[in-house]
Image (cartoon, helix red, strand yellow):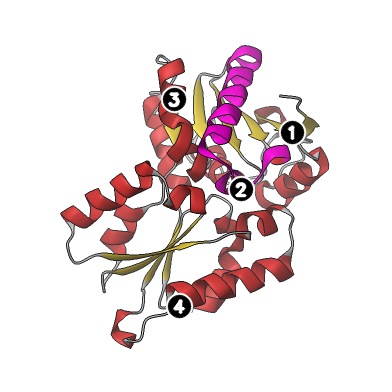
Amino acid sequence: MKTIGVFDSGVGGLSVLRALLTEIPEAQFVYVADSAFAPYGERSAQAVVNRSRRIAAHLRQHHAVDALVVACNTATAMAVDELRRIYPHLPIVGVEPALKTAAALSRTGHIGVLATRGTLDSVRFAQLRSRVEDSAPRIHFSCQPCDGLADAIERADPTTTQRLCERYLQAVQALKDPTHRIDTLVLGCTHYPFAAPVLRQLCGSGVALVETGLPVARRTRAVLGIDAAAVHRGPVAPFRLQLLSTGDPAALTLAAQRWLCTSATAVRLVC
């Protein structure tokens, strides 16, 4: 059985882990929520690189992971190249805002992108955006940094989550010409899918929400050479999953119970 390490600044990466558990039922997973240092999107690039290196080292040395999934857009943007340099023989899969998928889905060519400031300010994101816009000139991205939203989702604060979603959607849709309103919204942080019910209510049925969990899961399966198997949609067996948190383990346990339907219990990680 392959062991796959997954990490994020907090509970947001559970949106990616959910897809991994479903798409690769024959693997076991070690998930690290670096909650003591969340949110990454509001930290310096060097701080994110340092945390990513420490967590990758722990997963490699103490859990002998066969692959690593960087389930955080900010950590991917700032640290994935460094991790691949350090571990050249370890399959490492990152996540990035699904701009290409959104471009293929959009009918009007007007796409909103919600992401952390760290992701939107990164060179990696700028390169991705440029590639997509060069290949599809009709596409226009309206990118909105969402300060505080990942943290509100992390703290399971529905009032603040609702308020921030309203604020940032209003900002991304603030175009005078109604023909330029977005029809596709990219959720550019792994925390944001857990606010999808709020976003769908605010956007209405005419706006498609795009996240990255499923493509990341399929990419991970491919790089490990695992044949496609029947997807697993039942409760997650505890033996398949270890949950580690540098912050409050109880918060990660509750989040995993809510979003993964698992009875696995998180433990504290000093890293």
Name which of mark 3 and mark 4 comes first in the sequence.
3
Name which of mark 1 and mark 3 comes first in the sequence.
3
The answer to whether mark 1 and mark 4 are in CB contact below 8 A is no
State whether residue 229 appears in this view. no
Instruction: Judge the density around disc 1: few (<14), some (14-19), many (≥20) Cα neighbours within 10 Å.
Output: some
Q: CA distance from mark 1 to mark 4?
A: 38 Å
Which quadrant, please, contains the C terminus?
top right
Closer to the camera: disc 3 or disc 2? 3
Secondary structure beneath dot 3 equals: helix
- Asked if the magenta segment contains residue 45, the reply would be yes
Position in image of residue 212 (x %, y %): 44, 49
Q: CA distance from mark 2 to mark 1?
A: 14 Å
Q: Nearer the viewer, residue 50 or 34?
A: 50
Instruction: Judge the density around disc 2: few (<14), some (14-19), many (≥20) Cα neighbours within 10 Å.
Output: many
Q: Which residue is mark 4?
A: 205
Name which of mark 1 and mark 4 comes first in the sequence.
4
Q: Which residue is mark 2?
A: 12
Position in image of residue 195 (x %, y %): 60, 63
Q: CA distance from mark 1 to mark 3?
A: 22 Å
Closer to the camera: disc 1 or disc 3? 3
- Residue type indicated by callout 4: Ser
Write down the region rendered in magenta: 36-64
Q: Which residue is mark 1?
A: 246
Residue at coordinates 58% horizontally, 75% vertically from top-left?
Answer: 166
- Residue type indicated by callout 1: Thr
Which quadrant, please, contains the N terminus?
top right
Q: Nearer the viewer, residue 265 or 119?
A: 119
* Count of residue discs: 4
- Residue type indicated by callout 3: Glu
Residue 201 against residue 247 in the figure, above or below: below
Secondary structure beneath dot 2 equals: loop
Closer to the camera: disc 1 or disc 4? 1
